[in-house]
Image: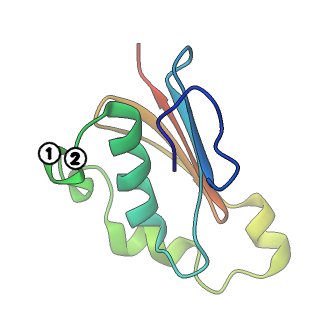
C-alpha cells in the first residue's frame, strides 16, 4: 500500500492525492474487514487504532462472511458499500475502494 501520488510497482494499493481515493487489493488470506480498516487508515492518514470501530457501522464477522465460500459467478457480483470514518467504502471479494467524503 502506498500513500504517494504515484503507484509503487511493488504495491497492491494506490492513494491518489487529488481525488483522495484508494483501491486496495485484498490479500488472499486477509479478511475484508481488516482490509477496510487498513484502506481507510491510509486515505485518512490515521493509525488504525485512531479510527472509530468498524463494528459501529457493520458487523465485521458478517462482512467477512459475505465473501466466504462464494462461487466464481457470485464473487464477480457481490458488493457492499458503507460510510466509515468520513469515507465512502465499497467492498468486493477482491478489493476495497475508499473515497474520502467531501
Q: As drawn, is 77 to the left or to the right of 3?
A: right
Name the residue beneath numbered marker 1: 50
Q: Position of residue 64 (x, y in %)?
A: 46, 73
Task: Tell whether label 2 touches label 1 (CB within 8 Å).
Answer: yes
At label 1, counting other C-alpha atoms closer than 10 Å, the crowd grade (few under 14, some 14-19, many 20 or more) is: few
- Which quadrant is home to the C terminus? top left
Q: Nearer the viewer, mark 1 or mark 2?
A: 2
In the image, residue 88 sits, relative to residue 55, either above or below, namely above
Q: Nearer the viewer, residue 76 or 18?
A: 18
**Residue shown at the point (51%, 50%) measured from the top left:** 1
Q: Position of residue 87 (x, y in %)?
A: 39, 31
In the image, residue 13 sits, relative to residue 100, either above or below, namely below
At label 2, counting other C-alpha atoms closer than 10 Å, the crowd grade (few under 14, some 14-19, many 20 or more) is: few
Name the residue beneath numbered marker 2: 47
The image quarter containing residue 51 is top left
The image quarter containing residue 55 is bottom left
Looking at the rendered structure, the secondary structure element under dot 1 is helix
Q: Position of residue 79 (x, y in %)?
A: 63, 54
Q: Nearer the viewer, residue 87 or 24?
A: 24
Q: Position of residue 72 (x, y in %)?
A: 83, 77
Looking at the rendered structure, the secondary structure element under dot 2 is loop
In the image, residue 47 sits, relative to residue 98, either above or below, namely below
Q: Nearer the viewer, residue 80 or 15?
A: 15
Residue found farthest to the right? 73
**Residue shown at the point (15%, 53%) measured from the top left:** 49
Q: As drawn, is 63 to the left or to the right of 79?
A: left
Amino acid at each position: 500500500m502506498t500513500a504517494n501520488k504515484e503507484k509503487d510497482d511493488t504495491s497492491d494499493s494506490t492513494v491518489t492525492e487529488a481525488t483522495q481515493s484508494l483501491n486496495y487489493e485484498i490479500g488472499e488470506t486477509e479478511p475484508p474487514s481488516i482490509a477496510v480498516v487498513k484502506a481507510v487508515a491510509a486515505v485518512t492518514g490515521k493509525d488504525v487504532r485512531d479510527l472509530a470501530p468498524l463494528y459501529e457501522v457493520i458487523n465485521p464477522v458478517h462482512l467477512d462472511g459475505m465473501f466466504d465460500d462464494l462461487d466464481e459467478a457470485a464473487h464477480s457480483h457481490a458488493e457492499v458499500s458503507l460510510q466509515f470514518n468520513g469515507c465512502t467504502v465499497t467492498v468486493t471479494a477482491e478489493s476495497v475502494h475508499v473515497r474520502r467524503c467531501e
